[in-house]
Image: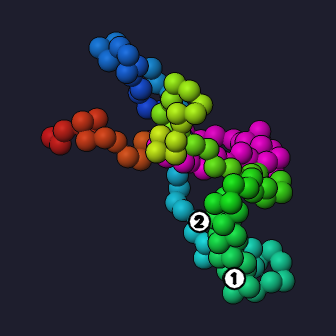
Amino acid sequence: MDKYLTYSVVERKDPQNPEVAGKFYAQAQARGEAGIRELSQRIQQTCTVTRADVMAVLIALEDVVADSLANGEIVRLGELGSLQISLSSEGSLTKEDFHDGLIKKGKIIFRGGQTLVNTLNTLKYQKVEQKYKKEEEEEPLP
C-alpha cells in the first residue's frame, strides 16, 4: 500500500516587500503524532521484544542522547541520522575578547541518515486543504 505525505498550498509574502503579492508554496500537513507509547507499540509488533522493554530502551536512549550532547559528542543513530549541538553567539573584535557570555543559545542539529534520505526520495504526495490558518487569513462567517 502506497503512503502519501499530505500537503496544502499556502501563500507566503516576501518580508522585504510585503506590499507585493505573495507566491504559493507547498506546506506539509501533519496527520497526527506518534509518541513514545505509540512507537513502542509499533516496534513490539515487528519483533519479539515486549512493549515494556521497548519503552525502557527508548527512555534510556533519551537520557543517553541528552548526556552525550551535553558532553559535546556527536550522537550517531546508525542509518537514522545524527544529532549535534550548534551555538549562536555575538561576535567579539578579537579572539581574546570572546567570553561565554556572548553565547546566546544552543540548538540541536539533526542530519538524516540514509534510511530517512531514502524515505524522502520515495515520497508520494497528496494535496489537502490547509489544516490551520492564521486568524487574519480566515474567511469571515456569513
The disc placed on residue 86 is: none
- Whole-percent x and y of residue 80? 77, 55
- Please tell me whether residue 107 is drawn above or below residue 137 in the rendered image: below
Q: What is the CA distance from the residue labelled 2 to the residue labelled 1?
A: 17 Å
- Whole-percent x and y of residue 58? 69, 74
Q: Residues within 10 Å of mark 1 (few under 14, many from 20)?
A: few
The disc placed on residue 34 is: 2
- Whole-percent x and y of residue 29? 51, 46
Please, what is the three-letter code of the amino acid marked with disc 1? Answer: Ala
Please, what is the three-letter code of the amino acid marked with disc 2? Answer: Ala
Q: Is residue 61 left or right of residue 27?
A: right
Residue 111 on the magenta span: yes
For mark 1, what is the residue? 56
Which residue appears at 77% of the width and 39% of the height? 121
Which residue appears at 56% of the width and 48% of the height? 107
Q: In which quadrant is the C terminus drawn? A: top left
Q: Secondary structure at mark 1?
A: helix
Q: Is residue 108 left or right of residue 112?
A: left
Which is more toward the observer, 141 or 34? 34
Q: Secondary structure at mark 2?
A: loop
Here the colouring is: rainbow
Q: Residues within 10 Å of mark 2 (few under 14, many from 20)?
A: few
- Quick one: label 2 or label 1, which is nearer the N terminus? 2
Which is more toward the observer, 50 or 81? 81
Q: Is residue 128 visible?
A: no
Q: Is residue 65 left or right of residue 13?
A: right
Which residues fall within the magenta stretch?
A: 103-129
- Please tell me whether residue 85 is drawn above or below residue 138 in the rendered image: below
